[in-house]
Image (cartoon, rainbow, N blue to C red):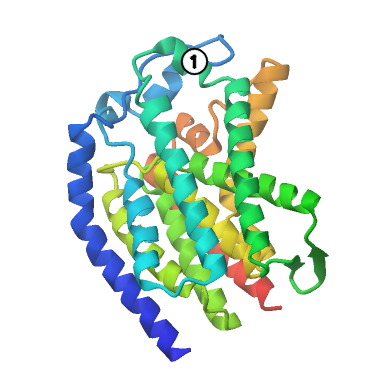
């Protein structure tokens, strides 16, 4: 145990140093290729009203021009260092494949769909519709199904164990269900990336807590990966202190969300994972309720969704929302560890 912990701490230190060097270079490249935010007034997907409230609470006149693909820092450094330095077990190899694929999907989403059409109000309005989001979700679920099949074919993932109380053997239907739940985990993480430091702070707390849980349980397979991830998250969080030097976007939010769900799944810590990440699921639920209500009842539940933007709209400053969400995450992470060790 001592050797793997020391090794993981070495990886944490190395990934921190490499991230410190790479981050300023990446920021310069993003500016050079104009991969920056550019919020403009557009119609909502319902075609009634505009995004003026969102532009106001996000202070678009001040934040437009901020690089919005800073998650490349995570997408590149974490799998590269893991592949070079960490012992590559079959399950870790599948994790890296999924990490890279969802980072790529996030890169395409931001570089093409967000930045590529930021001056086209009709396309931007279309991207706010229920149908567009459902289409993207379908593609991502199919991608997740493929990754789950890879995991199953390793021969090391034969059942889902819930708190050592209920073990469910893997079947084709269960694999599809896991893929769908996994995609919602990814989507919930992506939606959380809405305020300076919010998403990366939450995931840093979850990464630390999951690492502690695995150490206590004697499960060391993913500790080197988590050490590398934590080192990059620390530097990422530094650059996300308000005012953020960059926003992560899909290239960072998607692979981290996937990785934490994956590790919770294969280490039989799915229930603790759901507790630890519960704030991201609440954020996604608020967005889903808003879209459903607007689609079928033409009424808002929140002033603006997801819920952290609602708090902004009613007057909470960003730092207040972010820090309270961090504290909530810390509490549910402690609760998750407690439940896992019962």
How far across and down, in percent of the image, does residue 273 sit? 61, 61
- Quickly name the residue at label 1: 125
| Mark count | 1
Question: 306 or 324: which is nearer to us?
Answer: 306
Q: Is residue 220 above or below residue 185?
A: below
What residue is shown at x 39% (from left), y 14% (from top)? 41
Question: How far across and how far down the image is residue 23, in percent?
Answer: 23, 52
Q: Between 280 and 269, which is closer to the camera in this rendering?
A: 269
Residue drawn at x 22%, y 59% is: 20
Q: Residue at x 68, y 18 (%)?
A: 295
Query: Relative to 293, does residue 234 appear above or below in the rendering?
Result: below
Q: Is residue 332 visible?
A: no
Q: Callout 1: helix, strand or loop?
A: helix
Residue 220 located left or right of residue 29: right
Q: Residue at x 40, y 44 (%)?
A: 251
Quarter of the image that includes the C terminus: bottom right
Q: Point out the residue furthest to the bottom here.
A: 2
On the question of residue 143 being in view, the answer is yes
Residue 156 image offset from top left, x and y in percent: 66, 70
Q: Which class describes the residues within 10 Å of circle 1: few (<14), some (14-19), or many (20+)? A: some
State the image coordinates of residue 25 (x, y, percent, origin top left).
18, 48
């Amino acid at each position: 145990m001592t050797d793997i912990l020391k090794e993981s701490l070495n990886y944490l230190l190395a990934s921190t140093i490499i991230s410190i060097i790479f981050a300023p270079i990446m920021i310069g490249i993003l500016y050079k290729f104009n991969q920056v935010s550019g919020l403009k007034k557009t119609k909502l997907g319902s075609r009634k009203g505009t995004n003026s409230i969102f532009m106001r609470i996000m202070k678009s006149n001040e934040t437009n021009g901020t690089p919005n693909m800073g998650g490349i820092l995570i997408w590149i450094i974490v799998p590269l260092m893991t592949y070079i330095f960490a012992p590559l077990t079959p399950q870790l190899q599948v994790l890296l494949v999924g990490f890279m694929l969802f980072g790529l999907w996030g890169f395409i989403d931001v570089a093409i769909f967000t930045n590529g059409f930021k001056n086209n109000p009709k396309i931007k309005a279309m991207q706010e519709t229920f149908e567009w989001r459902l289409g993207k979700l379908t593609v991502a679920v199919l991608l997740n199904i493929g990754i789950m099949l890879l995991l199953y074919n390793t021969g090391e993932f034969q059942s889902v164990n819930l708190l050592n109380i209920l073990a469910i053997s893997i079947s084709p239907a269960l694999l599809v269900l896991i893929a769908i739940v996994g995609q919602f985990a990814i989507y919930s993480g992506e939606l959380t990336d809405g305020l300076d430091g919010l998403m990366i702070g939450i995931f840093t707390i979850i990464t630390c807590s999951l690492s502690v849980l695995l150490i206590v349980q004697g499960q060391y397979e993913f500790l080197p990966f988590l050490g590398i991830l934590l080192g990059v998250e620390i530097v990422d969080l530094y650059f996300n202190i308000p005012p953020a030097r960059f926003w992560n976007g899909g290239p960072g939010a998607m692979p981290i969300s996937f990785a934490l769900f994956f590790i919770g799944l294969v280490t039989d810590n799915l229930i603790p994972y759901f507790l630890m990440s519960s704030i991201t699921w609440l954020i996604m639920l608020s967005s889903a309720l808003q879209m459903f209500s607007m689609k079928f009842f033409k009424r808002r539940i929140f002033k603006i969704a997801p819920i952290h933007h609602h708090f902004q709209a009613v007057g909470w400053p960003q730092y207040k929302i972010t820090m309270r969400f961090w504290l909530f995450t810390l509490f549910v992470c402690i609760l998750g560890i407690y439940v896992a060790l019962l």
